[in-house]
Structures are given as C-alpha cells and as structure tokens.
Image: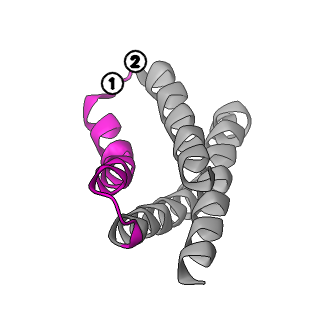
Amino acid sequence: MLMTVSKFLYALTALVFAGMIIYGKLFVFKKRKPQFVSDYCATMAGILGVYTVLSMLLAGLFPSASAKMFMFAFALSPFVIGLFATYHTEKYFTVLQVLLLIISTAYVVL
C-alpha cells in the first residue's frame, strides 16, 4: 500500500514539475511581474523538494540494489544538472532535466 501510494505521488510530482518547467520556460519567465515570477519559482522549489524526498523514500522502499541506485541518481539529478548549467547551456540542460523527469516517472510506474 505504501509503495503504491508513493509511486503515484512520485509520478504526479514529477509530471507536475516537468509541466511547470515547460510552462515557465514558455510563458512565465518572460513576464514583467517580478512578484508572480518569484512566487512561481518558489512553488517550483517546493515541488523539487517533494520530488527529491519521494525519490529518497522510494530508494529505501525498492528491494533491489540497482533500483535503489537509479532512484538515488534521479534524486540528485536536478542538483547535478544545476551545477553544470550555465547561461549559454541553460536550454539544453532544461530539456535534459525534463527528459530525466519523464524517464524517472516511466521507471517508477513501469
């Protein structure tokens, strides 16, 4: 039961986070209202925190060592990508992050 609920919450959180990244990139970050952009970024940070915590929880719940390592890698991937991203490569790393979110969702669900 705990595993099923955790998987569902993880998939929901990852897909919402991917959607927020795409929507933010297309519409929100071009707005001129700093308060709205700031609130949007704070919401994204909260969802990133939930995604990381759920990744660690699932890493503890999965039985095999390889699944634990994959979940641990998915938990750390946004932070590692953030370390390597620069102003000039930001678009590429954004696409990479969205792809990793979709792949992690598929990995957990399937």
Residue indicated by mark 2:
89
Contact, mark 1 vs mark 2 (Cβ under 8 Å): yes
Q: Amino acid at mark 1?
A: Thr
Secondary structure under tag 1 reads: loop
Image x and y of residue 47, in percent: 54, 63
The dominant secondary structure in magenta is helix
Q: Is residue 109 above or below residue 46?
A: above
The residue lying at 39 percent from left, 48 percent from top is 74
Which residue extends farthest front? 64
Inspect this view and state whether residue 28 appears: no
Inspect this view and state whether residue 62 appears: yes
Q: Does residue 69 show up magenta in the picture?
A: yes
Left or right of 21 on screen, residue 78:
left
Left or right of 75 on screen, residue 69:
left
* Quadrant of residue 19 within the rendered picture: top right
Left or right of 52 on screen, residue 69:
left
Q: Nearer the viewer, residue 61 or 18?
A: 61
Magenta region: which residues? Answer: 61-88
Q: Is residue 8 above or below residue 103?
A: below
Image x and y of residue 43, in percent: 58, 63
Residue indicated by mark 1:
86
